[in-house]
């Protein structure tokens, strides 16, 4: 009865016609120098002109002043201790460079991923293409060697940590430096001020915040303009819709959904009886708990239905749906596998009409969700 799927190779579950679809997507991306139209929305206004950066020449999206590919690459699980057994470093370097060759110009890491290991991999991978990409990382923790000992965003600490980040990332500037988690002991104005100083010094280009509430965002933005907010946002976890997306729209700030594939739940092979190995972080995620999965699989079923309808995959439906919500949304699916990278980028070929979006929303709203964050969380710091 119990199906363990976490280390499976989902590409083996992909039906032959779907494989052709994925291969066709990649081929099309290589052959077409400039895609037009906003990914995710049919008949939208014309896209921002493509940047010269990135050989795939995808239409770009804006995160505040930054211009990035419409889908980025999350590099967290390239370090051990997350969702997969530790992948080989050299392979992850190649994966990042191949993502860039497909048009990805936005790469996400953090000091705490590993810790330090994801930044090292990203730094090595991006060295030959550093000027063609937007590099994002995050601060916010204290360490004893390689053990995380708590939150710390004291201004002096932030400035000291950035020196190590620059070394690991093999660069002289961080394009987007996020506060990873709010430090309850430090006023947001002080944190924003410290990042403002780093921007003045040329070590950082723009400021981001992760998992904060709209009030904290406003406090940060008043001191140092915020380019992007990063929070979990997916078909299943829709808390940002309560107030954050509107706040970002009002302030001209980009939004970067993490966990956009529902942490892999949309992969073929999952069902209500799927379980995660104890060392997989997803074993402790409430919406993936055994008692939640049976209910939450209804969202997966909805994505699977729409995948059939639109000749796409469920993951592509989920990513295209996010892209269609606002033009300042840039999801960063995390993957360590080439087939998944190709599949995720294929979401750019999926379009929803306004009618389809409304129909999808109605169906989604009717589905119960277990284990997601309650709306009251929108007013608290994570
Ligand atoms: N700001 C924050 O607090 C925060 C928190 C968590 C993560 N993040 C960032 O956001 C990124 C994405 O978050 P996430 O990794 O949690 O979310 P995610 O992309 O929803 O989930 C990643 C999981 O989904 C699997 N996956 C990805 N694409 C797939 C596909 N096409 N088919 C099947 N499985 C697929 C991956 O496995 P494979 O490796 O096997 O593809 C991995 O296990 C991270 O890499 C990190 O950079 C930020």
Image: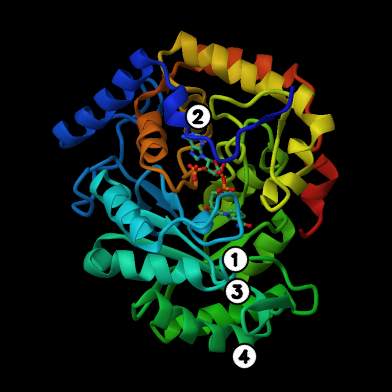
Looking at the image, can residue 6 be seen? yes
- At 55% from the left and 72% from the top, the residue drawn is 111
Q: Which element type, helix, strand or loop, lies under badge 1? A: helix
x then y, percent, for residue 180:
63, 66
Would you say 176 lies left or right of 361 here?
left
Q: Quadrant of residue 187?
A: bottom right
Residue under numbered circle 3:
223
Q: Which element type, helix, strand or loop, lies under badge 2? A: helix
Looking at the image, can residue 206 be seen? no
Distance between the alpha carbons at the discs numbered 2 and 1: 33 Å
- Which color scheme did the rendering employ for the protein? rainbow
Distance between the alpha carbons at the discs numbered 1 and 4: 20 Å
29 to 256, vertically: above or below = above
Residue under numbered circle 1:
221
Q: Which element type, helix, strand or loop, lies under badge 3? A: helix
Q: Earlier in the sequence, mark 1 or mark 4?
A: 4
Distance between the alpha carbons at the discs numbered 1 and 3: 5 Å
Residue under numbered circle 4:
156
The N terminus is located in which quarter?
top right
354 to 224, vertically: above or below = above
Q: Residues within 10 Å of mark 4 (few under 14, many from 20)?
A: few
Q: Which element type, helix, strand or loop, lies under badge 4? A: helix
């Amino acid at each position: 009865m119990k199906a363990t799927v976490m280390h499976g190779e989902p590409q083996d579950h992909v039906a032959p016609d779907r494989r052709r679809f994925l291969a066709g997507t990649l081929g099309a991306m290589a052959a077409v120098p400039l895609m037009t139209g906003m990914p995710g929305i049919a008949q939208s206004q014309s896209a921002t002109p493509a940047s010269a950066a990135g050989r795939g020449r995808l239409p770009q999206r804006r995160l505040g002043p930054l211009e990035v590919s419409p889908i980025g690459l999350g590099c967290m699980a390239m370090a051990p201790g997350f969702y997969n057994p530790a992948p080989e470093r050299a392979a992850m370097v190649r994966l990042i460079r191949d993502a860039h060759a497909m048009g990805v110009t936005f790469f996400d890491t953090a000091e705490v991923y590993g810790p330090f290991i994801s930044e090292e991999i990203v730094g090595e991978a991006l060295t030959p293409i550093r000027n063609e990409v937007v590099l994002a990382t995050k601060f916010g923790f204290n360490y004893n060697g390689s053990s995380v000992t708590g939150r710390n965003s004291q201004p002096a600490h932030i400035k000291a940590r950035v020196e190590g980040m620059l070394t690991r990332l093999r660069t002289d500037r961080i394009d987007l430096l996020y506060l990873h988690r709010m430090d309850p002991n430090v006023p947001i104005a002080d944190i924003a001020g410290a990042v403002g100083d780093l921007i003045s010094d040329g070590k950082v280009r723009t400021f981001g915040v992760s998992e904060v509430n709209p009030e904290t965002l406003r406090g940060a933005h008043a001191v140092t303009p915020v380019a992007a907010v990063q929070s979990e946002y997916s078909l299943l976890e829709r808390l940002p819709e309560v107030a954050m997306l509107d706040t970002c729209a009002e302030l001209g700030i980009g939004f970067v959904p993490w966990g956009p594939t529902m942490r892999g739940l949309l992969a073929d092979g999952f069902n209500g009886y799927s379980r995660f190995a104890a060392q997989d972080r997803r074993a402790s995620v409430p919406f993936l708990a055994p008692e939640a999965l049976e209910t939450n699989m209804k969202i997966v079923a909805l994505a699977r239905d729409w995948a059939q309808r639109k000749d796409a995959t469920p993951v592509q439906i989920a990513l295209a749906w996010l892209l269609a919500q606002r033009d300042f949304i840039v999801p960063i699916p995390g993957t360590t596998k080439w087939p998944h990278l190709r599949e995720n980028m294929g979401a750019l070929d999926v379009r929803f009409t306004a009618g389809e979006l409304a129909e999808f929303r109605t169906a989604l709203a009717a589905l119960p969700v277990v284990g997601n964050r309650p709306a009251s969380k929108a007013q608290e710091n994570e």
